[in-house]
Amino acid sequence: MKTFNATGRRKNSIARIRIMPGSGKIEVNKKSLIDYFKRETLKMIIEQPLEVTESLGKFDIFARVHGGGLSGQAGAVRLGISRALLKYDDELKSALRSHGFLTRDPREKERKKYGMAGARKRYQFSKR
């Protein structure tokens, strides 16, 4: 059985995705999708490329993801799934591109600057 591998990244998260034709099982870090991503919105984000390409239930998906938080990990998995689907079938490119699933979200955390409480927040000013 042929497998298709891809990598997805978002914020500080990196996801390695392996898809193969199957029954529609989605596994993240050796746990089911429901057990790993408990929030309904995160499950929805991950399934978006499958819904757009009408391949929900056609592929078994195995994801290894690390780094960042759950939201970043979900975004990384979505990008990885989109890229893997593209390797499976080039015809899906226009559908995935039009929904923005092939674009890597470039936003990263801004670094903290010296003399400040965070990246932009300043310490409280005292006149006296």
Image (spheres, rainbow, N blue to C red):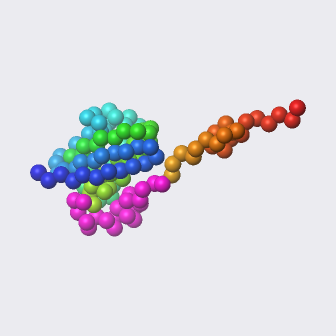
- In the rendered structure, the answer to whether residue 37 lies left or right of residue 2 reads right
Residue at screen point 24% across, 60% down: 87
Residue 51 in sight here: no
Residue at screen point 37% across, 64% down: 97
Q: Nearer the viewer, residue 104 or 98?
A: 104
Residue that sits furthest to the front in the current view: 114
Magenta span contains residue 101? yes
From this view, report whether residue 47 is shown above or below residue 33: below
Number of dots carrying numbers: 0
Residue 7 in sight here: yes
Residue 94: image quadrant is bottom left
From this view, report whether residue 91 is shown above or below residue 115: below
- In the rendered structure, the answer to whether residue 87 lies left or right of residue 45 reads left
- In the rendered structure, the answer to whether residue 89 lies left or right of residue 112 reads left
Q: Indicate the position of residue 99 as horizontal and vertical percent values.
A: 40, 61
Residue 91: image quadrant is bottom left
Residue that sits furthest to the right in the current view: 128
Residue that sits furthest to the left in the current view: 1
- The residue range painted magenta reads 87-106
Q: Indicate the position of residue 36 as horizontal and vertical percent values.
A: 34, 34
Q: Indicate the position of residue 116 as horizontal and vertical percent values.
A: 69, 39
Residue at screen point 28% across, 34% down: 31
From this view, report whether residue 37 is shown above or below residue 7: above
From this view, report whether residue 91 is shown above or below residue 83: below
Magenta span contains residue 115? no
Quarter of the rendering occupied by the C terminus: top right
